[in-house]
Amino acid sequence: MKIKNQEFRKSKSNNTDINNTDKSDTDSIYPSYPVILCSQVLKERLRPDGKEQIDEYRNIIRDQISYECFQKGDSGQIAEVDELIELMAEVMTMPDSCILRIAGVDKTASVVKSRFMKINQMHMEYVLDCLSSNTTKIGNIKAYLLTVLYNATMTINHYYTAEVRHDLYGVGEVPC
């Protein structure tokens, strides 16, 4: 029996282009979240009649969350609400086939849109309350806000139930 050395294929080096100009020095090694992948180019945000679609969604969202109630309050809070409305309106104008990363899971824009259309004034107050009580460092605020908005309709009841149970613990019987 004759022993032969194994032949190995030549491997490609990890960095073949040392003058890579596709990435800027400010790009992070971590992917930017929320990752937005579209199977088609984003549609024009102008409707045939010239009115911007994003303006329409801003108005719909403002009606949905009773925006005038937030206008009567703290000016800092209205700025936060405006940012959330802007973020929601941006998502609402995306094609349904786009993919958004919410809490690390890829979701189609149509799913995210349907969840956003359920948000009302109570959900918005809940989101603002959660944001104001958060003390941890947030790496990507846009991804965090999208996730908080997306989850608001599903978590609001349990959140307030847990708060009541916490506040009433030891005081007496906790209501069911």
Image: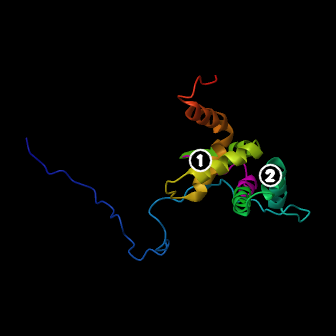
Q: Nearer the viewer, residue 176 or 61?
A: 176
> Quick one: label 1, few (<14), some, or many (20+) residues within 10 Å?
many
**Percent position (x, y) of residue 99?**
63, 50
Residue 35 in sight from this viewpoint: no
Tell me the quadrant of the picture where the C terminus can be found: top right
Q: Earlier in the sequence, mark 2 or mark 1?
A: 2
Mark 2 vs mark 1, CA separation in Å:
20 Å
Please determine whether, in this image, residue 41 is positioned above or below residue 27: above
Range covered by the magenta-colored residues? 88-103
User: Of tags 2 and 1, which is closer to the observer?
Assistant: 2
Q: Residue at x 66, y 51 (%)?
A: 128
- What SS does tag 2 mark? helix
Q: Is residue 97 magenta?
A: yes
Residue 77 in sight from this viewpoint: yes
Q: Nearer the viewer, residue 39 or 66?
A: 66
Q: Amino acid at mark 1?
A: Ile
Q: Is residue 116 magenta?
A: no
**Percent position (x, y) of residue 76?**
69, 62
| Circle number at residue 61 | 2
| Circle number at residue 4 | none
Q: Amino acid at mark 2?
A: Ile
Q: Nearer the viewer, residue 163 or 95?
A: 163
Q: Which image quadrant is residue 57 in?
A: bottom right
Mark 1 lies on residue: 102
Q: Residue at x 82, y 49 (%)?
A: 66
Tell me the quadrant of the picture where the N terminus can be found: top left
**Percent position (x, y) of residue 45?**
79, 62
Q: Does 140 sit left or right of 11 as displayed?
A: right
> Quick one: label 2, few (<14), some, or many (20+) residues within 10 Å?
many
Q: Does 158 sit left or right of 7 as displayed?
A: right
